[in-house]
Image (tube, grey):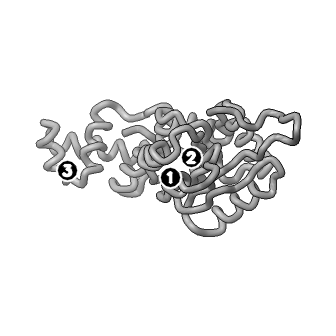
Amino acid sequence: MSDTRSQSPTGPAPAIRVAVLGEPGLCRTLVAGVVAAAPDFEVVVEGEACAADLCRLADPGPDLVLVDLNPEDEPATVVAALRAAVPHCAVVVLTNRPSARMLRSALRLRVRGVVAKDVPPEEMLAQLRAVAEGRRAIDPVTAVAALDTAVNPLTEREREVAAAAATGLPSREIAGSLHLAPGTVRNHLSSLLRKTGGRNRWEAVQRAQEAGWI
């Protein structure tokens, strides 16, 4: 990303242009307000996370996009749309319940920042400034939360059974597809429940997915 904010001999550096994308509501409004109130930032786009084309319409376009994602959102879809709309724009993910899977997915996509929603406003702004300067910013709260779930406690067979269960197959069909006895599948599912703390197989599978274990 080219740096258009270096000090000019005729005046102060231009503001860092930011797009704030997310579900309509208080959170997006508050984030946009915090960013807009900072003297070195300008909010040039505010809209829904799926509205990547809004960034292309802004003139001048944003230097970075702050996109609010829910834990169940798939970053790849949103980031791909943003990269198509504004290829040279830095992407920062804002999330309220970071998981190892989301963090790994975001890093694979080479987003420039991952920020928790509950960080103090000045800390969020500091991280956005770091991104605008060409650095990567992942706040410590998010990193620790992801590292806490980074070690996968599931065995290879348990991961296979959990992945099959995630498709909605009943135990007998899972057994047939993996060439296992039905009793063995039930044992693996019981282990999955114990290791994830899920109350039932569906909750156990969801927790395993959120942790990036399957």
40 lies left or right of 98: right
Q: Is residue 152 visible?
A: yes
Q: Is residue 148 visible?
A: no
Amino acid at pointer 3: Ser
Residue named by callout 1: 71
Q: Secondary structure at mark 1?
A: loop
Residue 72 picture location, percent across and down: 45, 53
Asked whether the residues under the numbered discs 1 and 2 touch, taking CB atoms below 8 Å apart as contact, a structural biologist would say yes
- Find residue 139 and report its image quarter: top right
Residue named by callout 3: 171
Q: Quadrant of the N terminus?
A: top right
User: Looking at the image, which residue is at 29% across and 41% down?
Assistant: 188
Residue 3 picture location, percent across and down: 70, 33
Q: What mark, if any, has residue 98 been given in the picture?
A: 2
Q: Residues within 10 Å of mark 3 (few under 14, many from 20)?
A: some
Going from N to C along the chain, the mark reached first, 3 or 2, is: 2
